[in-house]
Image (cartoon, rainbow, N blue to C red):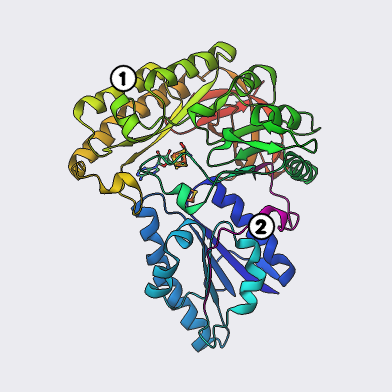
Amino acid sequence: MKRLFIKTYGCQMNVYDSDRMTDVLAPLGYVPTDTAESADMVILNTCHIREKAAEKVFSELGRLRQHKSRAEEQEGRSMLIAVAGCVAQAEGDEITRRAPWVDMVVGPQTYHRLPELVGQADPAARKRVVDTDFPAEVKFDFLPEEHASRGPAAFLSVQEGCDKFCSFCVVPYTRGAEYSRPASSVLEEARRLVASGTVELTLLGQNVNAYHGVMDSGETMSLGRLIRELAEIDGLERIRYTTSHPLDMDEELITAHRDVPQLMPYLHLPVQSGSNRILTAMNRRHDADTYFRIIDRLREVKPDLALSGDFIVGFPGETDRDFADTLKLIDRVGYASAYSFKYSQRPGTPAATEDVQVDEQVKSDRLSALQQLLDAQQLAFNKSAEGQEMDILIERAGGREGQMTGRSPFMQSVYLNGDAADIGKIRRMKIIEGRQNSLLAEAIS
Ligand code: SAH
Ligand code: SF4
Ligand code: F3S
């Protein structure tokens, strides 16, 4: 038996990939462990989306170097260190240069080859391997079946890569071109997950609503249709999907929110900015009005749909007026939750070389103003749940003895009293308190 420790950064697709890497390495005898110190192999599954995320990897590699030399010098055992994910893809050579104690560098589309790479890497001979191809073969065709249950709420990648090329974003370069898995392969994986105890599935893709998987007939299936097919699986109680691009919200997907009871009333639909000038410069390919029309249509078919979004402040050339348009958009839409970021210059992206970069302090001020508004909306949304009854999926132990945490249909974290026997159950409960980041629920008396 060998011990494997994987540390995951970034988005849910990396969480999914980390589980798949565990599956790939299981036949070699690798079993997950909780600490890097004791591991025979450590994988950092990395994110390149903003500068901070990418820099974290190098400081973590510094710590790992010490664990590795302690293992070798004091315990007489070897420790393989691998860097996977989007930083591996973007900065493979830089990693081996700055951190020569790294044994393997593997990109998001080649980790199915990990067993071969483990065979090639030889820490004693300081032989390092780098595999950051965009291979002709598709990794999904080479991944073994899941090695262990993914628990009550699981991720399932259905789409990868992106062809949208927003001018600030590294994803098209780190993940490669858009690809949709065949419908049958997705449906089979979903059935296996449900058979092993999953009740909630979140379909993943960098651009998940651009999904167009081939069917056995040779025609393609949209995400809306895929969701309808998944809803036929007995025991699958909840379906979600993320992340979507506004332009790919087609009518079949929108009406799935009306027609499919298992599809949860929550949608993450990033818009990034409320200024048409900035949206154009970002190459988002739609304006604010188009976004409003999509939201209006969604709310027409599903009035209680909770919305979430992503925002970037301080994109090159963003003026006070552009920023005011973003606040106006947020005001008009009303978000249940949202993620917001200061623009980060990413090497190789068109926006990074614009000479009208926004001052750091201005970015910080705008971010706090934006977050103040979003926090207020989120608190109001959580408060509005007080007194309501909701179905809560109980997922794991909470921080305190006798406390469990779960999810509301609207993606809110919920604290409740219960024990491990409740994990995986959906219970109708009463919300007694709405807080900034969570709800408190109790049994209905
Ligand atoms: N595919 C998704 C987003 C993937 S990246 C979409 O199109 O919306 C997740 C979020 O990170 C983005 O929505 C954006 O808000 C943020 N982001 C991406 N690149 C960034 C950059 N260079 N600086 C700051 N935030 C960025
Ligand atoms: Fe990045 Fe834009 Fe693609 Fe989203 S749609 S992953 S923001 S390029
Ligand atoms: Fe990060 Fe790559 Fe996901 S850059 S956000 S881990 S696709």
Residue visible at 58% across and 15% down?
A: 302
SS class of the residue under badge 2? Answer: loop
Residue 96 horizontal/vertical position (percent): 43, 73
Q: Position of residue 397 (x, y in %)?
A: 61, 45
- Please name whichever residue, 301 or 382, is drawn nearer the observer in this view of the structure: 301
Position of the N terminus by quadrant: bottom right
What residue do we see at 40% from left, 45% from top?
169
Question: What crowding class fits label 1: few (fewer than 14 Cα within 10 Å), some (14-19), or many (20 or more)?
Answer: few
Q: Range of the magenta residues?
A: 128-156
Give the mark, 1 or 2, whose residue is nearer the N terminus: 2
Image quadrant holding the C terminus, namely top right
Horizontal side of residue 206 vs 182, given as left or right: left
- Measuring 24% from the left and 44% from the top, which residue is drawn there? 354
Q: Nearer the viewer, mark 1 or mark 2?
A: 2
Q: Position of residue 311 (x, y in %)?
A: 37, 34
Q: Residue at x 37, y 21 (%)?
A: 288
Q: On the rendering, which quadrant does ligand 2 occupy?
A: top left
Query: Picture quarter containing residue 187?
Result: top right
Disc marking residue 51 = none
- Magenta-span inclusion, residue 383: no
Front residue of this view, candidates 283 and 298: 283
Q: Which residue is mark 1?
A: 328
Q: Which residue is mark 2?
A: 137
**Is residue 108 visible from the viewing direction of this image?**
yes
In this rendering, is residue 13 above or below 436?
below
By secondary structure, the bulk of the magenta-drawn segment is best described as loop
Q: Quadrant of residue 252?
A: top right
* Tag 1: amino acid: Lys
- Judged from the image, the secondary structure of the residue bearing numbered disc 1 is helix
The percent position of residue 401, horizontal first and vertical second, equals: 58, 45
